[in-house]
Amino acid sequence: MPPLPTVLLYGIPYVNAAPDALYEHLRASLLAPTSAPTVIFTPNASIAAAAKQDASLTALLCRATLCLPDGIGILAAARRRGTPIRYRLPGIETGEQVLRLAAAYTLPVFFLGAAPGVARRAAARWKQQLPSLPIAGTHHGYFTQSGEQNERILSRIRDSGARIVLVCLGFPAQERWIDQNAPLLPGVQMLLGLGGSFDVWSGEKRRAPTLFRRLHTEWLWRMLCDPTKICRLPAMISFVWHAKDEKRAKSAVKIP
Ligand code: UDP
């Protein structure tokens, strides 16, 4: 399977492909599994800004099979830097496509994360929409991510026969959990870090209305719904704004 094209932004290779090309790639990955699972992370500008300040987070994101540009902030930074990324590939929509593939090819899915009851309700809603979707199991995301508790969850996932694991623990917990535990789940072909997706799928939170999505301001909607996220705004703005400086710095190096 040919790799998807990527654009490197602050050391992270973001997929630069249309949603249809991505979904076809995911379908092919699920139908022809390799020895290593497909790991999908979905950084938005707030995550990318944190990674820009911390090399270990950049290295963590780089260990994914695919990093998807989740949000207009990544596209804006890439454009300012002079290396445009054409398509926004939201994690939540990618998760939905993966669930449709799982239903079509009867691949059991485990939902891990969010507050108690939320993953179960999200899975139940999907089962209503896609009756052929095999739900391998669900578990909330408030557990100690090492030691005995984590071991118990790993055993549950292994015993469930899950082929796909959706992980919603927030950044960077979900990326760390996937990075550390994917090798311990030999039957699992694909793991995705999906932030707050279970909250939306369960009906706990509302996804941004169409107008916000059309204007590419889902990030603003999330901040309006959860004002604690407003503190992320300066780092996001600085991340996008300073992308141009990086372009200037790069071209300045080239001139003798
Ligand atoms: N969460 C969790 N365990 C934790 C902390 C958070 O399962 O220890 C869940 C939380 O309930 C929410 C998701 O992780 O469902 C994070 O969603 P959010 O949209 O806040 O993601 P972020 O923007 O932080 O990546």
Image (tube, rainbow, N blue to C red):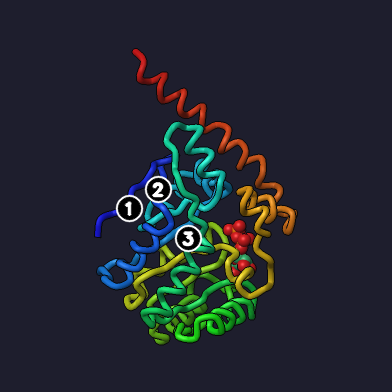
Name the residue type under label 1: Leu
Q: Is residue 69 above or below residue 108?
A: above
Q: Residue at x 48, y 74 (%)?
A: 147
The residue singled out by tag 1 in the image is 4
Q: Secondary structure at mark 1?
A: loop
Q: Quadrant of residue 162?
A: bottom left
Which residue ends up furthest to the top in the rendered image?
256
Q: Is residue 54 visible?
A: yes
The residue singled out by tag 2 in the image is 16
Name the residue type under label 3: Glu
Q: How many marks?
A: 3
Q: Earlier in the sequence, mark 3 or mark 1?
A: 1
Q: In whole angstroms, how far apart are the C-alphas of marks 3 and 2?
A: 21 Å
Packing grade of label 2 (10 A; few <14, some 14-19, many >=20) is: many
Q: Secondary structure at mark 2?
A: loop
Q: Is residue 187 above or below residue 64?
A: below
Name the residue type under label 2: Asn
Determine if the C-beta at disc 2 is less than 8 A from ligand 1.
no
Residue 109 position within the rendered picture, expressed as x and y whole percent measured from the top left: 45, 78
Discs 3, 1 touching: Cβ within 8 Å? no
Residue 145 position within the rendered picture, expressed as x and y whole percent measured from the top left: 52, 70
